[in-house]
Amino acid sequence: MGFNDHMEEDDGYKDFLQSLISNGHLEGAAEGITKKVIAEGVDSLSSKQKWLFDKNVENYITSECKRAGCDIPWSEMYEAHDNGGICSWCAHMNAKDD
């Protein structure tokens, strides 16, 4: 799953973006542009806004689990970033091993 794949689908993408805002990961223009994407979609951005959006949001995207190699859905993306790049199942299994 690439960064721009399925961005308009209601599969947790907007919730992922809202988590970045709510948890203080984005500020200034990047925060405003991300709010615009949530409300109007990525197609509503100018090329300059899209560049800034991509630059600021891509650091938080973990599309593939570093442990199992499976795709990480948008609904788990924010937690995957905090878990060091692993999906929720692998994070659960790691916790059981501890």
Image (spheres, rainbow, N blue to C red):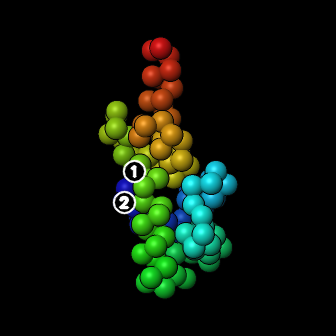
Q: Which mark is residue 2?
A: 2
* Foreground residue among 72 and 29: 29
Q: Which mark is residue 22?
A: none
Residue kind at label 2, given as amino acid type: Gly
Residue 86 seen in the current view: yes
Is residue 88 depicted above or below 27 in this figure?
above
Which residue is rendered at x = 51% and y = 40% of the image?
Answer: 82
**Residue 45 relative to residue 69: left or right:** right
Residue 32 image point, x, y percent: 62, 72
For marks 2 and 1, give the CA distance: 7 Å
Residue 83 image point, x, y percent: 48, 36
Which residue is rendered at x = 42% and y = 55% of the image?
Answer: 59
Residue kind at label 1, given as amino acid type: Ser
What crowding class fits label 2: few (fewer than 14 Cα within 10 Å), some (14-19), or many (20 or more)?
few
In the picture, which quadrant includes the N terminus?
A: bottom left
Q: Which mark is residue 63?
A: 1
Check disc 2 and report its element: helix, strand or loop: loop
- The image quadrant that residue 84 belongs to is top left
* Foreground residue among 22 and 62: 22
Which residue is rendered at x = 57% and y = 61% of the image?
Answer: 26
Sooner in the amino-acid sequence: mark 2 or mark 1: 2
Check disc 1 and report its element: helix, strand or loop: loop
Cβ atoms at labels 2 and 1 below 8 Å apart: yes
Residue 12 seen in the current view: no
What crowding class fits label 1: few (fewer than 14 Cα within 10 Å), some (14-19), or many (20 or more)?
many
Which residue is rendered at x = 50% and y = 20% of the image?
Answer: 95
Q: Point out the residue furthest to the front here.
A: 28
Residue 69 image point, x, y percent: 32, 39
